[in-house]
Amino acid sequence: MRLLPLIAATFFMVSGGPYGIEDILDAGYLKGLIILVALPFLWSLPTALMIGELASALPEEGGFYVWVRRALGPFWGYQEAWLSLTASVFDMAIYPTLFVLYLSRLFPAWTAGWHGAAWELGVIALCCAWNLLGAPAVGEGSMGLFVLLLSPFAVLIAVAIWHGAHLPVHASWTQSGETGGLTTAILVAMWNYMGWDNASTVAREVDDPRRNYPRAMLWSTAVVTVSYVIPLAAMAWAGIPTGQFSTGSWADIARTLVGPWLGVAIVVGGTLTAVGMFNALTMSYARLPMVLAEDRMLPAVLARRNRRGVPWVAVLVCAGAWAVALRFSFERLISLDLILYGASLILEFVALVVLRLREPKLERRFRAGGFATVCVIGTVPTLLIVYAAVASRHERMGSMPALLLGALIAGCGPLFFLLSKTMGQRRDAVTSNGN
């Protein structure tokens, strides 16, 4: 992948456009927009700088797993991969769910009953097939999806600005949100701004990764922020009440402001963004079990590639795991996803500092700053992760609190490391005896 396809793929790994940010308006327009403008500086930019340095220094397939393993050793490298893969089970279930939510806005009968589950499984199957064509196909496809899904919003924004210009007052800016809506808004915004490190796992398939990764991180941060802030600001200017917003409501607003045809276009864009995000993240996550298999920490079959270099067995195994979590609600998925992903992100910030200490002469074409900067760069993201965990303590996954379930899943990492290490040693022993 060249720079533009990498930016487009990163855009889908992190964002996918305004779809999914509707619940931010539980806090009201003004607070919601302040959160969307502040988080790129407090959450996204430190992460992008960290990833830019580590990806330029160690452009290896497996990305963040390789960084943590090199800095902290095999045990912590495995924990990084474990947290990321278990987070992916809940993260990846969100996008087929969004696909069905948007499709139901246009064709409710198509998603009723078992049809909704069939559509979700169809999204998984489509993206698996797409990924088997190789990383360049995913990157180039992301560019096309980027244009298609944002085109209806360009029209909606233009009409909203024209409509707002004819209003006598703009009271929507000062509308208060719901009680407790601020916490929901922050959690949803954090989820919509996370995932920058996912692009690092396909480093061998990126053109000049030492140069292009830092550039892609910074450009993607700007593009994602603009794709969130401008549409919501336009809706506030047009006087759209915050009460009209819920997950999937962009289509209703487009029909109200412009007409049925734009509502249909927004729905189609919503389904495209779900496919684009699932597709790009499949490319990213599937490389983790492949690299673990190459390190003899998982069965060797997961390292098998097709003629395009795609780990096809890993793609299919991951897809099966992702299908398991399809029936959880959107909010519950976000809570657990943030807990597990946040823990893996903290390890990456630690790896950044440790590598500066242990390998000061490591070639770094991009630096996140001086040593003092890299020591503190992860402070605010870490505090936000702790806040998200505490705020999610009342969320439940079935009969169990989401925070407790997240802790139990993370706690299984060391056990699976010992199991994987033992199986790898036995496989090595069998191979040695065979020789």
Image: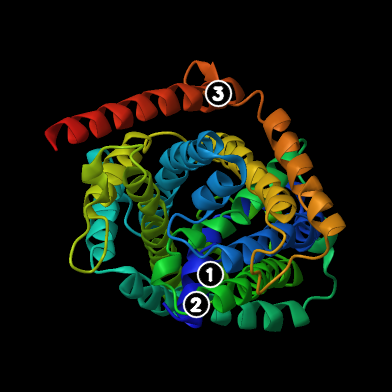
Q: CA distance from mark 2 to mark 3?
A: 36 Å
Q: Residue at x 63, y 72 (%)?
A: 214
Identify residue for label 2. 152
Q: Amino acid at mark 3?
A: Arg
Q: Residue at x 77, y 82 (%)?
A: 165
Picture layout, residue 401 above or below residue 58? above
Residue at disc 1, secondary structure: helix
| Pointer 3 or 1: first along the chain | 1
> Which quadrant of the figure has residue 242?
bottom right
Picture layout, residue 5 above or below residue 9? below
Can you give x and y, in whole percent of width and height, for residue 278 in the image?
A: 39, 56
Q: Nearer the viewer, mark 2 or mark 3?
A: 3
Q: Amino acid at mark 1?
A: Ala
Q: Say if mark 2 contacts mark 3, CB within 8 Å.
A: no
Instruction: Give 163 or 429, whichever is nearer the viewer.
Output: 429
Identify residue for label 1. 254
Q: Amino acid at mark 2?
A: Pro
Q: Nearer the viewer, mark 2 or mark 1?
A: 2
Q: Say if mark 2 contacts mark 1, CB within 8 Å.
A: yes
Residue at disc 2, secondary structure: helix
